[in-house]
Amino acid sequence: MRSKYVSADVIVAMVRCFSPRRIFPAYFLGFLVLFLYVLLNIESFCPELKDDVYVDKELKRLKEQREELNSQEKWLKTLQRRLRMKYPTDFEEFFLERSDEFPTIFAITPTYSRPVQKAELVRIMNTFTQVPNFHWIVIEDSPIKSELVTNLLARSGMRYTHLNVGTPTNMKLRPNDPNWLKPRGVLQRNAGLSWIRQNVDPAKTKGTVYFADDDNTYSLELFDEMRYTDKVSVWPVGLVGYLRYESPIVKHGKVTGWFTYWLPERPFAMDMAGFSLNLQLLFDYRDARFSFDVRRGELESALLGGFHLTLSDLEPKADNCTKVLVWHTRTEKASLKNENNFIAKGLTGSDLSIEV
């Protein structure tokens, strides 16, 4: 006759069957089987994953969101520029109060006397006046400061510095020389760099240095791009080098080379208008400057080499260098032959007291 009580041996056997050493492997094996089953049949649990239409819809939705954000950003920038034009003083005061967090752009512009000089300076001045926290350093290639430039800057309402230094006659281009024959603006740009090094405290002022020649045309968007530069920002330049544009070649967000016809093997084969420098670099490398003793087209490379830079230091701007925001337009030389024709006919030419 069986006992109605479970014997101690049975209890011990049952405990052994459900001991951790046996039950955990069983649970693990069960979980593994379930996982494999779900993995093999995942499409039945999430049918949308096998639907290419679903994936395309999600990609389209994300693209539309990105385009909407880009549109809003452009609208805000446009609004900011309109307000800046309408209330320039208020905007300047606003940015000056926040100069620690809003870097200053120091634009170095060499210039020289010629019939179109004022026209070109007025054109770029009208752009620069719309850029907040902007300091314009204008250096005349002359032994003295001219009234024309002095008066223009005084009426600009901008923060500016007016300098002058003459280029030796033997280093100047003659009237019929091509523009590339000799380096231009060397002493003037160096004077601008020296002024910054002597008058700006990088511990108190954060900023960007840009070489803004007076024969270029600038988009306001360019200055938004360059303002926050870690070392050197770069971008394309339009209508230069006898090409539609010259540009850094960018792959995976890094500069790998140069799109240019003339000597693409140059260390930094770009135009003067195609880069900006972090202000601090001028103080970390005080000897870096422009030089007359360079080959054609290597003025920029010689300067940037003085900062011990490599391609990996360059920061591509303007949507990875896919947008042109500055153009090397060069105003056509003015022909004034009829002034002499007036005199040849015994007539009086134009009034020289009227500034053009």
Image (cartoon, rainbow, N blue to C red):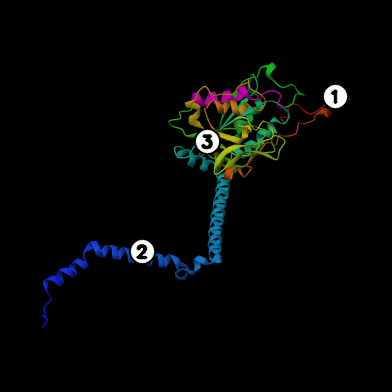
The residue drawn where x is 30% and y is 65% is 27
Q: Amino acid at mark 1?
A: Ile
**Along the polypeptide, which appears first: circle 2 or circle 1?**
2
- Nearer the observer: mark 3 or 2; the answer is 2
Give residue 126's mark: none
Question: Given the current orientation, which residue lies at the most extreme bottom position?
Answer: 1
Rounded to the nearest angstrom, the CA distance separating label 3 from label 2 is: 48 Å
- What element does badge 1 sit on? helix
Percent position of residue 201, x then y: 45, 28
Question: Given the current orientation, which residue lies at the most extreme front position?
Answer: 1
Left or right, residue 30 beside residue 274: left
Q: Which residue is mark 3?
A: 312
- Nearer the observer: mark 1 or 3; the answer is 3
- Nearer the observer: mark 2 or 1; the answer is 2
Percent position of residue 203, x then y: 43, 30
Left or right, residue 160 beside residue 101: right
Give residue 343's mark: 1
Looking at the image, do the residues carrying marks 3 and 2 touch, with CB atoms under 8 Å apart?
Answer: no
Q: Which residue is mark 2?
A: 32
Residue density around tag 3, few if under 14, some if 14–19, many if 20 or more, within 10 Å: few
Magenta-tinted stretch:
179-199
Q: Verify whether residue 184 appears in magenta.
A: yes
Nearer to the camera, 334 or 226? 226
Q: Amino acid at mark 2?
A: Leu
**Along the polypeptide, which appears first: circle 3 or circle 2?**
2
Percent position of residue 169, x then y: 69, 17
